[in-house]
Image (cartoon, rainbow, N blue to C red):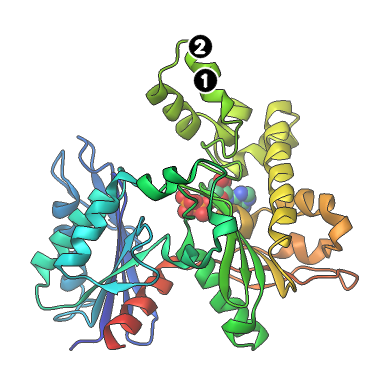
Amino acid sequence: MNDTILVINCGSSSLKIAVFDASFQRLGSALAERLGQSDAFARSDDNQHFHLKPGSAHREALGVLVSHFQSTGLLRGQPLAIGHRVVHGGEAFREAVVINPQVLDTIAACASLAPLHNPVNLLGIEATAELFPDVAQVAVFDTAFHQTLPEKAFLYALPTRFYRDWGIRRYGFHGTSHRYMLSETARLLDKPESEVSLVSAHLGNGCSITAIRDGASVDTSMGLTPLEGLVMGTRSGDVDPGLFDFLAGKGLDPAEAHRILNNESGLLGLSGQTNDMRTLSEMADHGHAPSALAIDVFCFRLARYIGAMMASLKTLDALVFTGGIGENSARVRATTLAQLELFGFRLDEELNRHHGAYTAGRIDASTSRHRIMVIPTNEELMIAREAVATTSG
Ligand code: ADP
């Protein structure tokens, strides 16, 4: 029976797979990690562990996990549709597309913009096509939702030949999550998406914030790469571009500087301890000053960016928090919004404290000028919906 939808998300050394039924209920999911390494492993959401041969790559992991879902009966016959998360669609893709040879070539051509992700996304697509040669596969791009950014928001103030010849511009990421925030807010407020304006803050290990005006992304904090913008778990976010020259003077080559800004900075770099916000909050509560400082820098940058996003909006239906930190950290929400009273944001302390993951809801005080909401993200569900909409459209 063709009644399931597969969602596949290949990271550089991981693979996540989720199975939905035709009414978009999640039936199960599984994860493989440390792919390509001697201790590669896989497990399902019901905590079954699977043996992967040392050094197993995405193809082997996909085979093992698909067989698991087939043997448990969650996956029967051919899926209705298969959706793949693809990180970078450049300017070629404004929406999800059914994958064909030309689409594959274009995803490959965008690989210079996402060298860690697009090649591995292509591997996942190829391996899935071998398992299910007759099922339509859909590419859902992290960048597509932001293709509505106006020039004034996506251009860097660089010589225009950089954009013309090399495509250097702000692309934005986390598009699937911000798109889901739009869809959920529209549903909760009972308004058409095309009439909803939001500031959407996705705060996980990676963090980005987007201004959505009348249903379209009009500004976002990540840029040419996901390094720009907010403070993140291990990424610095914004730094002075003059830093690279300065570091070169100190003998750091560009690859080393890139590694430090991506993997050793952000909350980890500031605290000297961890990139994990929950642990940092606990350490700050126990008087660890660098952890408290890391949270302060994180929240101040976030507050600045919320203010910056307001410049692109005429009205605001809601400020929405999502991602592991956005959904769970009452402290981050309170510390950030305390700095934005000039804009009229006021939290209800009680609602803020009690709101956690799995429940969407409002956390603003009755005196707040704007609605403030927590909405758990669900990128896999969004990809499943896009896969079905694209194949049946
Ligand atoms: P990813 O971007 O990898 O999907 P998540 O969205 O799961 O990451 O977010 C991970 C972050 O969420 C971590 O910093 C984690 O500490 C934080 N987080 C999760 N639960 C809590 C909590 N209860 N309080 C504070 N931070 C939390």
Q: Residue at x 51, y 70 (%)?
A: 179
Q: Which residue is mark 1?
A: 245
Q: Residue at x 86, y 68 (%)?
A: 368
Point out the residue furthest to the right here: 367
**Left or right: where 102 falls relative to 241:** left
Q: Within 10 angstroms of label 1, few (less than 14), some, or many (20 or more) residues? A: few
Q: What quarter of the picture does the N terminus occupy?
A: bottom left
Dividing the picture into quarters, in which one does residue 255 lie?
Answer: top left
- CB at mark 2 closer than 8 A to ligand 1? no
Identity of the amino acid at label 1?
Asp
Q: Which mark is residue 249?
A: 2
**Left or right: where 2 falls relative to 17:** left
| Residue 57 placement (x, y as % from top left) | 17, 46
| Residue 169 placement (x, y as % from top left) | 47, 49
Residue 273 visible within the image = no
Identity of the amino acid at label 2?
Gly
- CB at mark 1 closer than 8 A to ligand 1? no
Q: Secondary structure at mark 2?
A: helix
